[in-house]
Image: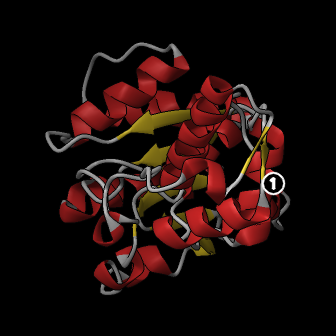
Amino acid sequence: MKSGIVPVKNVARLSAASRALLQRAPGAPGIGLVDGEAGFGKSTATAWLSNQTPSIYVRAIALWTPSAMLSAMCRELRVASGGSCSQMLDRIVETVSRTGQSVFVDEVDYIIKKTTLIETLRDLHDIATVPVIMIGESGIMERIGHLRRFTSRIAEHVTFQPLDEADAGLIADQLCSVKIKPDLLHQILRDTRGNCRNIVVSLARAEQIAKSSGIDEIGCDHVGKRKLFTGGNDAAGQTQPGAR
């Protein structure tokens, strides 16, 4: 099975939000929020998007302090990471302001638990005036709703949704080397509840069955009682903590 980004509806909405942030009027807020259930493709899509425009992409971890967060950004920007937090922030601001780089921060669920971290992101946004895009789990907006100075700067909010049959068919057409019949595609979508990661896993297993059987088209009759997605219905859309 091939790898790559397929322009499903979630990716299209993410790309539109990114363009809106980049093209916003001077002085307009430029923070973006991307959320959704684990396995819906947020991290993959935003990592791809960050490679399409000048930007840096960092992944938060549970142990981050303001110093650790700013050091990670400095490393991505290839500027000195030593000195105080204020000095590092100054270097980051100077660099992204000069280069026009957006800042993508994944696993932002760790950040919202620490006021100093999220306020540092607000400072970065306000001073550098470049887009800051945060990626996290569903419900993140509700958890930061009390931080009015921050939420008032969120100009674009994209919630990744379960894939529909058209999305799943697009993935099958573009990534599979065998044809997936409509009945099997419908079963995969039902069993995975539209979870992008689990759909890709199921399609890969269907492709393996087809290749081992010497056929170039596969449907439910070829799969039989074999499970393509083994996580169980209750696990669809639920993965290990930290997975995106």
Residue 7 visible, this orientation: no
Total marks shown come to 1
Q: Is residue 99 visible?
A: yes
**For residue 97, above or below residue 118:** above
Q: Looking at the picture, does residue 65 appear above or below residue 33?
A: above
Q: Is residue 12 left or right of residue 87?
A: right
Q: Circle 1 is placed at which residue position?
A: 170
Q: Position of residue 53 (x, y in %)?
A: 77, 36
Which one is nearer the viewer's eye here, 153 or 46?
A: 46
Left or right: residue 1 versus residue 78 is right
- Identify the residue at the far left of this view: 63
**Residue located 80% across and 68% down the image:** 166
Q: Nearer the viewer, residue 120 or 199?
A: 199
Camera-side residue of 73 and 236? 236
At which x and y percent is residue 203? 61, 45
Quadrant of res 70: top left
Query: Which colour assignment does the render follow?
Result: secondary structure
Q: Residue at x 23, y 56 (%)?
A: 116
Quadrant for the N terminus, please.
top right
Answer above or below: position of 139 versus 34.
Answer: below
Residue 90 on image: x %, y %: 45, 34
Where disc 1 sits, the SS reads helix
Count neighbours of disc 1 (C-alpha within 10 A) and say few if under 14, some if 14 to 19, many if 20 or more: some
The residue at 30%/55% (across/down) is 239
